[in-house]
Amino acid sequence: MNQKPNESAVDGLPLNTIIDGDCIDVMNTLPENSVDLIFADPPYNLQLKSDLHRPDNSKVDAVDDHWDQFDSFAAYDTFTRNWLKAARRILKPNGAIWVIGSYHNIFRVGTALQDAGYWILNDVVWRKSNPMPNFRGKRFTNAHETMIWASKAEGSKYTFNYEALKAMNEGIQMRSDWVLPICNGHERLKDENGDKAHPTQKPESLLHRVLLGTTNPGDVVLDPFFGTGTTGAVAKMLGRDFIGIEREEAYRKVAQKRIDNLRKYDSDALAVSLSKRAEP
């Protein structure tokens, strides 16, 4: 467990910590009904069978890592059901979950969510303003990913900061299709060799909308597939506490360095994220 001495554990929770381990095993050790929000970016099970090349024959840096490989759809479904069960146990009664995926996995995840007792609130389409082209020209350019937002149960009083999202959308009600660029430029983290630190790093702008809209300052946000720590970085900037779970040492190191170098936003700037509907 990567935990600094000045970071506290409240109600048995290792706050603002990146935990080394399997997400299911770790979540099963955390207190029941203790987390406000879960953001999950699980393996997509892309099923890549061979290398991908551009028209000039250069190799595409595709997702072929071991953590994205499953023997069958049945094996992936079992994995999905198990981590969703562990996640639901630690969510507070009025907690909620976001799961992001592509066409490879999100429909299977949606079924598993409903079977596990979650109540789907919205699906949100992240439309990428700068997607990777389809190099083979045999399919449409895959220009979006889908996020499912679900409460723990049908009657949960989940957090939704309607006014905050409207304010950041030029005074217009936020829609369920978000046009945002993929992670690139200075935001794209690199490893010691100058290569991508993680093949599927999510942009901070995406997590900013999620956390601003569906959590409040001081809430606990857990990410069971922490990667390079986008969830933790945005949570820290927005005055939320986070718990990250990541079994890959290389990702944990990059994430910890990233989060250590961040500071919170000014507290006055965060006041807009409190929903008028939630006020007494």
Image (spheres, grey):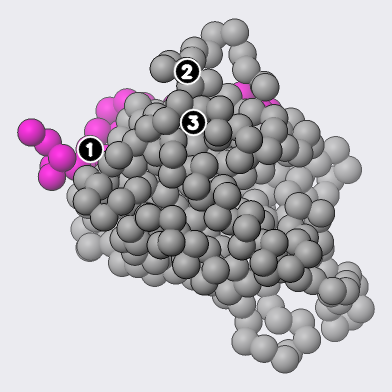
Q: Secondary structure at mark 3?
A: strand
Q: Residue furthest top?
A: 5
Q: Residue 229 location, x and y as percent?
A: 61, 39
Image position of 31 with respect to 93: above or below: above
| Three-letter code, disc 1 | Leu
Q: Earlier in the sequence, mark 3 or mark 2?
A: 2
Which residue is label 3 attached to?
242
Task: Based on the picture, tell me whether residue 15 belongs to the magenta stretch.
Answer: no
Rounded to the nearest angstrom, the CA distance separating label 3 from label 1 is 19 Å
Bounds of the magenta segment? 256-280
Q: Residues within 10 Å of mark 3 (few under 14, many from 20)?
A: many
Which dot marks residue 12?
A: 2
Q: Residue furthest left?
A: 280
Q: Main secondary structure of the magenta part?
A: helix
Q: Is 148 left or right of 255, judged from the image as shown?
A: left
Q: Quadrant of residue 29?
A: top right
In the rendered image, the quadrant that contains the N terminus is top right
Image position of 209 with respect to 120: above or below: above
Q: Residues within 10 Å of mark 2 (few under 14, many from 20)?
A: few
Q: Which residue: 30% across, 39% down?
A: 93
Q: Secondary structure at mark 1?
A: loop
Which dot marks residue 274?
A: 1
